[in-house]
C-alpha cells in the first residue's frame, strides 16, 4: 500500500471515528434528556400526589361543614356553586331543646358546649341514617329537609322524615337520667319537633363570595311555627304531610292555631306512632298496671313466665273495690 492509499485509509478511519464519537455524544445527550424528563415526570407525579392528598384533606375538612349529600354533589360535579335555586316539594323538619335558654344560664360554657355537641351528634346520626339533608344548626335548633338533592318521591320523603322524628324522640327517651348523671341537669332534656311538606325554593343563596345551601318559603316557615307549638317530647305534623303518610302512621285529633305570617288558621296533628311498629305490639293498661308485649320478639319462655305471673295476680285478694 503506497503513501497515498495509506493517507486515504487514515482519513477514512478518522471520519469513522468522528462519526462514532458523534453518535456516542448523541446517545449520551439523549440519555441525559431521558433522565431529565424522567426526573421531571417523577417530580410532577410526586407533586400531583401531594396535591391530591391535600385536596382529599380539604375535602374531608369541608365535609364537616356541609351535609354529606351536598358535599357529594359538589365534589362529583353534579352541583355547581353558583347563585342558583329551584322549586321543589320538600318535607321540612325543625327541632329544638325545650328550656335551653334557662339551661344555658345554669351550666358553665364548657359543660354547655359538651352537652350541645353530644345532643347534636346523636340527632345528626339519626338524620343521616334516614337520608335527611341537614340544612343547619341554630344553637340547639336543627333544620333538616327531605326531597333534595335526591328525592324518593313526596310520599317516601315524608315517610322517612316522620320515621326519623320518631327515632329521635325514642333516642331522647333512652337518654333519660343520662343528662343528670353526666351534666348535672335537674331535669331531662326534651325536644319538640315540627314537620311540614310543600313547595320550597331550594339552592344556593348569598353573595358571589359566600354561599349558603338552604331551603326557603312559606313551607319552611310553617314547619318552624309547628315546632314552636309542639309540646315537650311531641311531634307536630301539618295537614299537608299527614295526607301523604296517614296510611303508615297514627295521628291525634286535629288541632288549629293562628300563627304569625299566616292569614288563616293552620290545621295540624300530633304524630303518635308508626302503624307498622304497632302491628307487632300488644298493649294493656289500667290504673294500677301497664303491659306491653312485642309479639315479634317475645320468646316462648317469656310468655310462660308472664302466664305464671298473671296467675299469681289472679289469686290476690283485694280488700278495696
Image (spheres, rainbow, N blue to C red):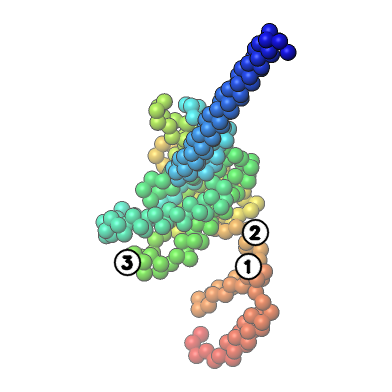
Q: Which residue is mark 2?
A: 276
Residue drawn at the location 42% of the way across and 56% of the way down: 119
Mark drawn on residue 116? none
For label 1, the SS is strand
> Of label 2 and label 3, which has the lower sequence position?
3
Q: Nearer the viewer, mark 2 or mark 3?
A: 3
Decide: is 49 above or below 97.
above
Residue drawn at the location 36% of the way across and 66% of the way down: 182
Q: CA distance from mark 1 to mark 3?
A: 35 Å
Q: CA distance from mark 1 to mark 2?
A: 10 Å
Q: Is residue 33 left or right of residue 138?
A: right
Q: Is residue 19 left or right of residue 142?
A: right
Q: Which residue is mark 3?
A: 184
Q: Are marks 1 and 2 in contact (CB under 8 Å)?
A: no
Residue drawn at the location 61% of the way across and 24% of the way down: 24
Q: Which residue is mark 1?
A: 281
Amino acid at each position: 500500500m503506497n503513501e497515498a492509499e495509506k493517507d486515504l485509509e487514515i482519513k477514512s478511519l478518522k471520519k469513522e471515528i468522528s462519526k462514532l464519537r458523534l453518535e456516542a455524544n448523541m446517545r449520551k445527550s439523549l440519555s441525559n434528556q431521558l433522565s431529565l424528563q424522567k426526573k421531571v415526570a417523577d417530580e410532577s407525579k410526586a407533586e400531583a400526589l401531594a396535591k391530591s392528598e391535600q385536596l382529599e384533606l380539604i375535602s374531608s375538612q369541608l365535609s364537616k361543614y356541609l351535609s354529606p349529600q351536598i358535599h357529594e354533589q359538589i365534589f362529583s360535579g353534579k352541583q355547581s356553586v353558583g347563585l342558583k335555586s329551584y322549586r321543589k316539594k320538600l318535607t321540612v323538619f325543625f327541632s329544638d331543646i325545650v328550656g335551653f335558654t334557662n339551661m344555658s344560664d345554669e351550666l358553665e360554657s364548657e359543660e354547655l358546649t359538651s352537652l350541645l355537641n353530644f345532643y347534636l351528634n346523636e340527632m345528626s346520626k339519626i338524620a343521616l341514617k334516614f337520608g335527611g339533608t341537614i340544612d343547619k344548626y341554630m344553637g340547639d335548633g336543627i333544620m333538616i329537609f327531605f326531597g333534595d338533592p335526591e328525592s324518593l318521591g313526596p310520599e317516601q320523603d315524608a315517610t322517612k322524615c316522620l320515621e326519623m322524628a320518631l327515632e329521635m324522640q325514642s333516642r331522647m327517651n333512652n337518654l333519660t337520667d343520662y343528662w343528670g348523671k353526666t351534666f348535672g341537669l335537674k331535669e331531662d332534656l326534651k325536644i319538640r319537633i315540627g314537620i311540614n311538606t310543600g313547595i320550597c325554593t331550594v339552592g344556593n343563596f348569598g353573595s358571589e363570595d359566600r354561599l349558603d345551601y338552604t331551603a326557603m318559603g312559606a313551607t319552611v316557615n310553617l314547619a318552624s311555627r309547628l315546632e314552636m307549638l309542639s309540646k315537650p317530647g311531641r311531634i307536630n305534623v301539618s295537614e299537608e304531610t299527614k295526607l301523604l303518610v296517614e296510611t303508615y302512621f297514627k295521628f291525634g285529633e286535629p288541632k288549629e292555631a293562628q300563627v304569625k305570617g299566616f292569614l288563616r288558621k293552620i290545621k295540624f296533628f300530633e304524630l303518635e306512632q308508626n302503624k307498622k311498629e304497632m302491628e307487632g305490639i300488644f298493649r294493656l293498661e289500667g290504673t294500677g298496671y301497664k303491659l306491653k308485649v312485642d309479639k315479634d320478639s317475645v320468646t316462648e319462655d317469656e310468655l310462660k313466665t308472664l302466664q305464671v305471673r298473671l296467675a299469681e295476680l289472679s289469686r290476690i285478694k283485694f280488700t278495696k273495690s
